[in-house]
Amino acid sequence: MPVNLIEDPSVNLKTQENRAWRRFRRHKMAVLSAGILTTLLMVVIFAPFLAPIHPHEIHIETGIFRPPSIDHWLGTDSVARDVWSRLIYGGRISIAVGVTAITISLSIGTLVGGISGYYGGLLDSVLMRITDVFLSLPTLIIVIASVALIGPSIRNLILIIGFLGWAHIARLVRGQYLSLREKDYVMAARCIGAK
């Protein structure tokens, strides 16, 4: 009977997943944090069903700064709008801004870091000096000034945050490329003529 010397990768992957899941469940704070984040995400996703009142609807009959009640779970604000509805819909906007801005940052950072780490040389030096400039900029001040100059809109805010946040990602990606270039299997491939 022949012995199979090659491990079944699906079994190895399954045991790694089980080990990671067990390790995660052992940390009570991680489980609690994941539960809170999941709950907040679900509340924000199902906002139209959980917020009985439109966030911009004004309730003059209720009055301003009213305390929590059956109709207004967190009361009303200075313009007699429902605070609970505004909180949930504001969460939707915050998550949309964060996800879209990080997608832009990831795209730019991965591209710049990958090109820099793969090609090296003069191109690497130039791209890393540009990255250093972006890392030295005071991001919050630039975001506030840019929104003041361009105009306050969600789209402008997403673009500004996305275009200012790529430098850290570029550094990480470049570091990974540089470490992978020095691995034994890459050296072996170069020795046999691979480029």
Image: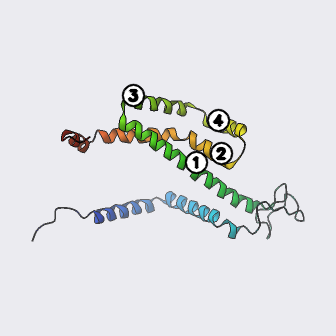
- Look at mark 4 in the image and give the residue it sits on: 142
Residue kind at label 4, given as amino acid type: Ile
- Which of disc 1 and disc 3 is earlier in sequence? 1
Specify few, some or many for label 1: CA neighbours under 10 Å numbering under 14, 14-19, or 20 or more: many
Q: Is residue 52 left or right of residue 128?
A: right
Evaluate if marks 2 and 1 touch, with contact meaning CB atoms under 8 Å apart.
yes
Compared with 96, 70 (above or below) is below
Compute the Cα span from label 3 to label 1: 30 Å
Q: Nearer the viewer, residue 122 or 50?
A: 122
Whichever of labels 3 and 4 marks the residue nearer the N terminus, that label is 3
Where is residue 188 shown, x and y percent of the image?
A: 20, 42
Question: Which amino acid type corresponds to the residue marked 1 in the rendered image?
Answer: Ala
Q: Which residue is mark 3?
A: 122
Q: Residue at x 62, y 47 (%)?
A: 158
Q: Which residue is mark 1?
A: 101
Q: Identify the residue at image location x=36%, y=35%.
A: 119
Q: Residues within 10 Å of mark 4 (few under 14, many from 20)?
A: some
Report the residue at 79% width, 60% height from top: 56
Identify the residue under disc 2.
Answer: 157
Q: Secondary structure at mark 2?
A: helix
Gap in angstroms between the C-alphas marked 4 and 1: 15 Å
In three-dimensional space, the C-alpha distance between marks 2 and 4, rounded to whole angstroms, equals 11 Å
